[in-house]
Amino acid sequence: MKLQYLLSLEHTVTRERSCSLVDIPDRSTAEYELEKLKHRFKAELISAKIRKNRPGQRSTYTINYKVKETETVHIF
């Protein structure tokens, strides 16, 4: 009788996802939201930038950020 060993086979995929938080009313709220993103994603947060959408009193802010996502699939 021969012994056979089964090795599990895994496939790991890492991808970057771009996201935005839009229509943030003021700069201090945008900075607060950025800190929440840093706390939520930690090392997975690749980059994040606060951007003012238009000049003047009726302006809003947007945070554009990239997140690294890793997924491991067990093939068998």
Image: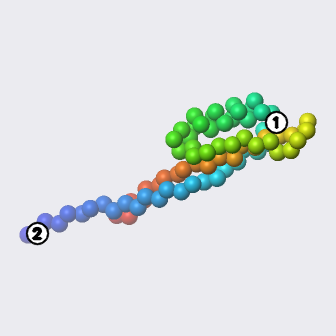
Q: Is residue 11 left or right of residue 5?
A: right
Q: Mark 1 sits on what residue? A: 25
Residue 65 left/right relative to 3: right
Residue 51: which quarter of the image?
A: top right
Colour scheme used in the picture? rainbow
Looking at this view, name the residue that lies furthest to the left: 1
Which is more N-terminal, label 2 or label 1? 2
Give the CA distance from mark 1 to mark 2: 70 Å
**Crowding at mark 2 (Cα within 10 Å: few <14, some 14-19, many 20+):** few
Q: Residue at x 57, y 54 (%)?
A: 16
Looking at the rendered structure, the secondary structure element under dot 2 is loop
Q: Give the percent coordinates (x, y) of residue 59.
A: 86, 40
Q: In the rendered image of this protein, does residue 68 appear above or below residue 13? A: above
**Residue 33 point in image, percent of width and height:** 69, 35
- The percent position of residue 76, horizontal first and vertical second, equals 34, 64
What type is the residue that disc 1 sits on? Pro
Task: Tell me where residue 65 appears, x and y as whole percent.
Answer: 65, 46
